């Protein structure tokens, strides 16, 4: 069966310009002049009989026709690239660029990536830890574990978990507070997490004590700017912390931390996995997404 194909160099120029948002950036990536990129795109528009870009001063925006074409072309070129590289043996393992919100990268995502890699010997990844929002195209990100997927309306997304924070401490502190509960905790023993810009509504000890109908005990306690550090210090017996259930799950299962109350505070947005629609067919991506979703779901039941 004969294939209906436009000029492949024109497709490459179009895909690069659409992904990077600039003829100049596309020319730098492809190693040709910006004028050549423009000519390739004009040839493609003539071939298809459709306008693919709106040109506004120094900016280019995809038309509806351009958006529809880009989704298919990007996926197709990615498949061609992967197949070619495999045949040329330039790489023997698939590689994903994974980006993650800092609060769950170390305590949750990293161990699960290691577990998935053990199941898939050819799987390799680059892991970036950074706040939302991220520039998928600029850094060629394949998958993002984000807080609040609404920040990425043009991407594919699946909810991972709508989490909550709960009070935890080492087993020794739990035993010490067995009679009084958190009524007996000193303000100086509270670990306060600086949640950073990722969390619009920040869960705090003041909100937890208010929800419990208790006064916030006086004292500055400890101020820590990363939730993974807060969790580690709580497990070491420094004090009592409010941490996400997702982050604390392994430490709770291993007995390094104990829950001090059934009262929890819900986070305002879910954690989600987000990826460019053009990357959907990239090797290992769908399997990794399914694996992480299944792991998060099974952990909610424990």
Image (cartoon, rainbow, N blue to C red):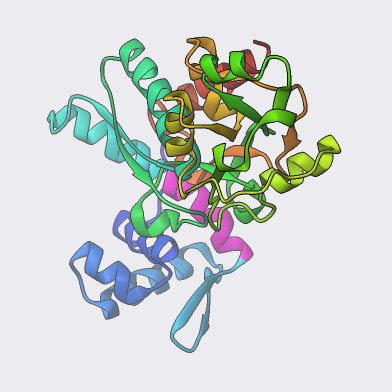
Q: Is residue 183 above or below residue 23?
A: above
Q: Position of residue 75 (x, y in %)?
A: 44, 42
Q: Is residue 247 above or below residue 68?
A: above
Q: Is residue 163 left or right of residue 25?
A: right
At 37% from the left and 60% from the top, the residue drawn is: 138
Q: Nearer the viewer, residue 34 or 267?
A: 267
Question: Quadrant location of residue 156?
Answer: top right
Residue 4 can be seen, yes or no: no
Q: Nearer the viewer, residue 4 or 144?
A: 144
Q: Position of residue 247 (x, y in %)?
A: 53, 29
Q: Position of residue 277 (x, y in %)?
A: 53, 44
Q: Is residue 160 left or right of residue 228?
A: right
At 67% from the left and 39% from the top, the residue drawn is: 270
Residue 150 can be seen, yes or no: yes
Question: Quadrant location of residue 24?
Answer: bottom left
Q: Is residue 165 left or right of residue 41?
A: right
At 34% from the left and 62% from the top, the residue drawn is: 10
Q: Is residue 291 above or below residue 166?
A: above
Start-end of magenta stretch: 64-75
Is residue 231 inside the magenta stretch? Answer: no
Q: Nearer the viewer, residue 255 or 290?
A: 255
Is residue 67 inside the magenta stretch? Answer: yes
On-image quarter of the N terminus: top left
In the rendered image, the residue lying farthest to the right is 213
């Amino acid at each position: 069966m004969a294939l209906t194909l436009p000029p492949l160099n024109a497709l490459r120029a179009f895909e690069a310009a659409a992904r990077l948002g600039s003829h100049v950036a596309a020319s730098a990536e492809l190693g040709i002049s910006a004028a050549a990129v423009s000519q390739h795109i004009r040839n493609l528009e003539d071939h298809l009989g459709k306008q693919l870009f709106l040109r506004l001063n120094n900016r280019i925006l995809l038309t509806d026709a351009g958006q529809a074409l880009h989704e298919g072309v990007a996926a197709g070129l990615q498949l061609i690239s992967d197949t070619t590289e495999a045949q040329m043996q330039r790489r023997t393992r698939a590689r994903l660029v994974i980006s993650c919100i800092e609060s769950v990268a170390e305590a949750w995502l990293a161990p699960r990536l290691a577990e998935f890699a053990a199941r898939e010997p050819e799987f390799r990844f680059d892991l970036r830890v950074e706040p939302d929002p991220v520039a998928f195209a600029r850094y060629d990100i394949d998958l993002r574990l984000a807080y609040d997927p609404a920040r990425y309306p043009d991407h594919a997304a699946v909810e991972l978990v709508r989490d909550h924070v709960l009070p935890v401490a080492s087993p020794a502190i739990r035993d010490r507070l067995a009679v009084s509960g958190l009524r007996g905790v000193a303000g100086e023993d509270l670990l306060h997490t600086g949640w950073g810009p990722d969390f619009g509504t920040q869960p705090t000890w003041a909100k937890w004590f208010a929800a419990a109908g208790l006064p916030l005990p006086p004292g500055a306690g400890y101020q820590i700017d990363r939730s993974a550090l807060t969790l580690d210090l709580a497990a070491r017996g420094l004090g009592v912390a409010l941490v996400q259930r997702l982050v604390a799950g392994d430490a709770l299962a291993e007995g390094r931390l104990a829950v001090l109350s059934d009262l929890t505070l819900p986070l305002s947005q879910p954690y989600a996995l987000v990826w460019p629609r053009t990357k959907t067919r990239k090797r290992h991506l769908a399997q990794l997404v399914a694996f992480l979703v299944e792991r998060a779901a099974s952990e909610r039941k424990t």
